[in-house]
Every structure is written in C-alpha cells, then in structure tokens.
Image (spheres, grey):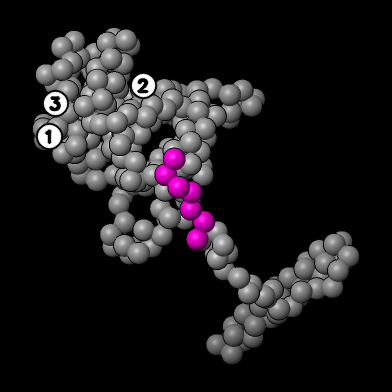
C-alpha cells in the first residue's frame, strides 16, 4: 500500500511538471524566442561604481534638495541656527493658530524650549508620560516636530527613524509636519542612507524607517490627486547650519 501511495505521488509530480513545461513552452512560442533553460547571467550587482562615488558639494546638495522638495508640494527654509528654527516654529504656530504641538523626545528639541516661547500652544514631548495615549495625542496635534536622521538631495527625501523616544506618529498624524535637517545629514544619493542600515545589521534596525518626500499625496480614487489623506498635508523642511 505504501509503495502504491508513493507511486501515486510520483505520478502527480510528473503530471504537474509536464503541465508546467507546456505552459512555459506556450509562453516562449508567443514571445517568439527559444525557451530559456538556464538562469540569465547577472555580471553586475547594485549600483555601478561611478554612481557609488558620485557626490555633490554642499551648496549643490542644498539646491537640489530644495528644488525636489518644492516640486512635490513641500516647503523649505534654510536657517543659520537652532535659534532661528525656534523663531520659525513660533512664527508659524502663531500664523496658523496652532493649539497643540507634539515633538520627538530629542535633546536638540528640548534645547529649543518651545514650551516657554509658545504662549497660546500646548507642547507635549513624546513618551514622557506613561499614562498618556500618545498616538491619540499625535492625531489631534496641529504641529508635529521631528529631527531628520538623514536627508537625500537627489530625491528630495527625508528619513525619520522610529524609536521609543521618536514615535512614528509624530511625523505621520499631525496636520502640519516640521522636519529639522542638520546640514551634515544631507547626502547626495539614497544609497548613502540605505548602506547605513546594512552596516548596522538586522538586529540594529529600528521598528520603522520612514522616507518622507513632501506632504501626503494620494490618487487612489479616480486618479484625483488629494493632499493630506494619509499623513500631514503641509510639510516644512528646515535646513539648519
């Protein structure tokens, strides 16, 4: 009985492979070329050497990032110092009548001392109160303020990583997102950012790696472009330094 069952399985396998061959031969015939029976050769892997060494000087990186970020509906400001960042945020909060602001729990943001500067806005710092429902607080926030971990000039993208002190909701849920980008974190190519994750290893990867290129955009419904459906509708990138 066992031998009969084994023979039955072998027949099923042979029938399946025969159907597979007919299927693939039919595709090859329709494409009008012989069946490929060996894997194609891939002599090159990854980006070519000339691209791996390609790098813009700082001013060109700033210009290209600005042009690309503006082209997708974002806003860019270049500011000399964090004091100017503080003045920018206070001015925008007053201009937009922001009532609630949420920030990452980062030393650079603590040094801004926004709580004392924003008299008409409540400022909360992510994950500083275990009793707080932080995702709900981020969803009702007018402004979310984050520090960029990386930025890419060639694509006009900003990378924000998540961590216990840097909840992803801060960049994904508020109406307006303000991203502070230290100039030294602005790279030319996306590969310069991606390689850092490979080098760190799987165990060191954060729970979330978010690439932000302007405000949220969606054309899912009848190709009708809508801004701000799946995230902030207004995004400011502040290049500092």
Closest to the observer, 35 or 13: 35
Q: Position of residue 100 (x, y in %)?
A: 23, 18
Residue at image point 36% right, 22% down: 176
In the drawing, what numbered circle is on residue 113? Answer: 3
Q: Is residue 31 above or below residue 42?
A: above
Q: CA distance from mark 2 to mark 1?
A: 22 Å
Categorize mark 2 by other alpha carbons within 10 Å: few (<14), some (14-19), many (20+).
many
> Disc 2 marks which residue?
175
Q: CA distance from mark 1 to mark 3?
A: 15 Å
Contact (Cβ within 8 Å) of mark 3 with mark 2? no
Q: Is residue 193 above or below residue 110?
A: below
Closest to the observer, 3 or 231: 231
Q: Position of residue 25 (x, y in %)?
A: 82, 70
Contact (Cβ within 8 Å) of mark 2 with mark 1? no
Disc 3 versus disc 2: nearer the observer: 3
In the rendered view, does 168 fall on the left or right side of 218? left
Categorize mark 3 by other alpha carbons within 10 Å: few (<14), some (14-19), many (20+).
few
Part of the protein shown in magenta: 53-59
In the drawing, what numbered circle is on residue 128? Answer: 1
């Amino acid at each position: 009985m066992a031998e009969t069952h084994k023979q039955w399985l072998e027949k099923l396998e042979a029938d399946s492979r025969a159907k597979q061959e007919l299927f693939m031969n039919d595709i090859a015939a329709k494409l009008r070329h012989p069946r490929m029976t060996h894997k194609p050769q891939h002599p090159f892997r990854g980006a070519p050497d000339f691209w791996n060494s390609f790098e813009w000087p700082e001013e060109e990186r700033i210009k290209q990032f600005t042009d690309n970020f503006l082209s997708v509906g974002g806003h860019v400001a270049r500011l000399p110092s964090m004091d100017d960042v503080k003045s920018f945020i206070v001015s925008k909060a007053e201009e937009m009548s922001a009532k609630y602001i949420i920030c990452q729990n980062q030393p650079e943001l603590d040094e801004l001392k926004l709580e004392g500067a924003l008299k008409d806005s409540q400022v909360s710092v992510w994950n500083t109160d275990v009793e707080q429902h932080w995702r709900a607080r981020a969803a009702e926030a007018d402004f979310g303020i984050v520090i960029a971990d990386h930025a890419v000039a060639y694509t006009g993208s900003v990378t924000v990583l998540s961590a216990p002190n840097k909840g992803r909701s801060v960049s994904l849920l508020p109406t307006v997102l303000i991203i502070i980008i230290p100039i030294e974190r602005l790279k030319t190519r996306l590969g310069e950012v991606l390689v850092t994750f490979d080098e760190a290893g799987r165990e060191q990867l954060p729970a979330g790696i978010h690439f932000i290129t302007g405000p949220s955009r969606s054309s899912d419904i009848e190709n009708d472009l809508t801004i701000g459906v799946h995230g902030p509708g207004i995004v400011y990138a502040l290049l500092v330094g």
